[in-house]
Image: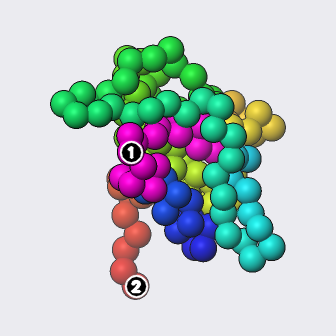
Amino acid sequence: MKIAHGTAKGLEYLHEKANPPVIYRDLKSPNILLDEEYNPKLSDFGLAKLGPVGEKTHVSTRVMGTYGYCAPEYIKTGQLTIKTDVYSFGIFLLELITGRKAVDSTKPASDQILVNWVCVFCSYIYFFPIQNA
């Protein structure tokens, strides 16, 4: 919980407090460093971009990032928004919760992409709800 909360606070700073806002664009577990007390620090700002300012809703850019963490709408349109980082944060949370990697080529083909595996699992629960005992 401490790692997730600290990472969220780091993104909040970049998105809400930095002026102009910064879109990190490469949020993934290897880029979250931990100190001796497990306080997270965001690292590797090589792909970061200054966010939209004023009336603008997005920044148009060449799609970059790590496979498995990039938001589908960013891949499709090239429109970079703060929501792009929020999607990546969601993948990071799924990694923390499940103990699985965002992309794991050692798994069967249908289970290699974490978000796909979770979606199948969630649809199973939706269609076959657990009955109260």
Identify the residue at image location x=80%, y=37%: 106
Rendered-image quadrant of the N terminus: bottom right
Q: Is residue 35 above or below residue 29?
A: below
Image-quadrant location for residue 20: top left
Identify the residue at image location x=73%, y=56%: 33
Q: Which mark is residue 41?
A: none
Identify the residue at image location x=32%, y=27%: 58
Residue 102 rendering spot, x and y as whole percentages: 64, 42
Q: Is residue 9 visible?
A: yes
Which residue is identified by label 2?
A: 133
Image-quadrant location for residue 133: bottom left
Q: Nearer the viewer, residue 42 or 127?
A: 42
Q: Nearer the viewer, mark 2 or mark 1?
A: 1
Q: Amino acid at mark 1?
A: Asn
Does residue 24 show up magenta in the picture?
A: yes
Which residue is identified by label 1?
A: 19
Q: Magenta stretch?
A: 13-29
Q: Nearer the viewer, residue 41 or 3?
A: 41
Identify the residue at image location x=39%, y=34%: 51
Residue 87 rendering spot, x and y as whole percentages: 45, 43
How far, Cα to Cα, is label 2 from label 1? 53 Å
Q: Is residue 30 above or below residue 73?
A: below
Q: Is residue 96 above or below residue 23?
A: below
Residues at marks 2 and 1 touching, judged by CB atoms closer than 8 Å: no
Residue 5 rendering spot, x and y as whole percentages: 53, 68
Q: Amino acid at mark 2?
A: Ala
Q: Is residue 103 left or right of residue 121?
A: right
